Image (cartoon, rainbow, N blue to C red):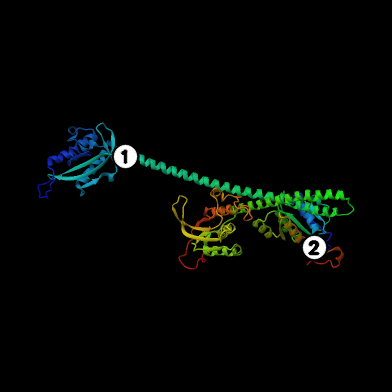
Amino acid sequence: MSGHARPKTPSAVPPERLAEILDIAEDGIVTVNLRREVVLFNRGAARIFGYAPAEILGRPLEDLLPLADRPNHAAQVDGFSRGPDVSRVMGDRRVVAGRRKDGTAFPAEVTISKLEHGGEPLLTAIVRDATVRKKYEDALVQMNQELEERVRARTAELAERNLQLAQKNEENELFVYSVSHDLRSPLVNLEGFSDELRLSQGDLEKLLRDPAIPADVRDRATDLVTAGMGESITFIRAAVARLSRIIDALLRLSRAGRVEYHPKTLGMNALVRRVVDALHNTTTEKGATIVVGDLPAAWADPTAVDQVFANLVGNALNYLDPARPGRIEVGGREGADGPDGSPDPAANTYWVADNGLGIPAPHLPKLFQPFQRLHADRAPGEGIGLAIVRRILGRVGGTIRAESVPGAGSTFFVTLPAGRSGGPGPSREDAG
Amino acid sequence: MRTDNLVILLAEDDDGHASLIQRNLKRAGLANEIVRVRDGQEALDYLRREGPFAGRASAPPLLLLVDINMPRVDGVGVLQAVKADPETAKLPVIMLTTTDDPREVERCYALGCSVYVTKPVKYEDFVDALTRLGMFLAIVKVPPTRATGGGSGA
């Protein structure tokens, strides 16, 4: 603004217009001289502080500060006016306090700058009332705190719930175990004594062949012993055998939940190869082909994973469609889809796909529940294989789901924690 | 020592199981008397000639058949007590149980049981197991007619 030559710009504003612009600026503009007397006080400042310019011009700057801040302020202003800085944002855009004419304090955002005028430094403060901003900021901070608090509480609640569920699960398993264990004892009697009955029945039949027995008595007795007793015993024995299988199945199921698992890095290619080899006879018998792709390493208990794949491949073989040559594919890829669909790099995906009978959609939700049998005529069993598979996978940090098209085949997708691969190389079995 | 007059001690709380075991041992050709007690405490009383068995003859039983799940003192308790007492430590103990829980089997063998027999719910298997048991006993047993050498077993 001095008379020095400056590049003239077409839009240069004349000084009197500048003063006008300053005056109507939204922000408050307050200028003080070296003695900290107010020499400029625009309309914005008047609106913020509640003073008319005439009331404050010539008054000490301290009038605009809360009483508590006044003693330190003079030194700070003096320091700034003598120092090398030409501008400074007070409190680094943090809010400082201002004082209105009515004595109330308010948060203010203040930028301060220094300008020489006729050899005297003038300090200009641009003041913005930060009451609203401060209010929002405080609310935001509080909301954040509340949110964090809620997250903490919810996390603790979930952890507690998880613990309770785990305990409940353990209780359930123990319950199933002891019940099935206790059920076996009377079953030994049922089985044993129905067999004793059968032996007695045989002895009776032999006795009845004695020619000394009158024919009409023999006929009636034989009918009673063979048809009557015999049929009853047969039914009892069939029922006992079924009960026994169910109890055994329950014991196996509860055992899958109680066994301790020891995870390690698993070379899945070798593991699945062993599973497929063990099923070689059945595969040949069924005229089926099993193709195994390249499988990424997993981190899990070997026995558990062995059981899972033996079950899935065994099922695939059991429920092939006789109408076409059976084809089963075991495949895998690195990574998995998390529960919300987002990719999970900490897990790997494996699948067992077949071109077998398939599973009708209504049955899919029940697939992993115990004692559910869809093709009961195809293979013996109690319908707990997949229930055990799911339970095992739950224990080793894996998941399972199925997709199926009836008449075309089924695919079971398994995820397992990813193995800690020791780099690429043929030695997949090296990890202890 | 003649063994045909030695008894087999059967500790079994379930009457049905006890009856089935006795029938099948007889069917397998075992001639020895079977003394049946209803729990582990009674089994220990018998061995120590205490309580109801205070007056019995001093000969120890030929072997013990012990059910695992019994009231008062269970089968494992009997096994432990038998193995801890030098007087009875050498007695063969056969554990009978309805479950084949691997941990239980392991525990019993660690405690020194001779044989661990699962009571199979399949009756044929049960007869099989007991027949094998009977044959094992037949080897130990010296038939009275040939009891000349006071002979050892197999």
Determine which residue is flagged by label 1. A134
Determine which residue is flagged by label 2. B138
Q: How far apart, in angstroms, are the residues tagged by discs 2 and 1?
A: 98 Å
Q: Are marks 2 and 1 in contact (CB under 8 Å)?
A: no
Question: Is label 2 on the same chain as label 1?
Answer: no
Give the crowd class for mark 2: few <14, some 14-19, many >=20 residues within 10 Å: some
Above or below, B18 against A142 in this view is below
Q: Is residue A382 left or right of residue A116?
A: right
Residue A343 screen position, x and y as percent: 44, 54
Instruction: Name, please, the residue furthest toward the top.
Output: A102
Please tell me whether mark 2 or mark 1 is closer to you in this view. 2
For image coordinates 52% across by 45% down, the residue present is A161
For image coordinates 41% across by 42% down, the residue present is A147
Instruction: Name, please, the residue furthest toward the front.
Output: A323
Helix, strand or loop at mark 1: helix
Above or below, A128 against A312 in this view is above
* Amino acid under disc 1: Lys
Q: Is residue A59 left or right of residue A340?
A: left
Near-viewer residue (A77 or B79):
B79
Q: Quadrant of residue A18?
A: top left
Above or below, A353 against A9 in this view is below
Near-viewer residue (A107 or A302):
A302
Q: Is residue A178 left or right of residue A224?
A: left
For disc 2, the chain is: B
Near-viewer residue (B86 or A164):
A164
For image coordinates 78% across by 48% down, the residue present is A228
Residue B15 screen position, x and y as percent: 77, 49
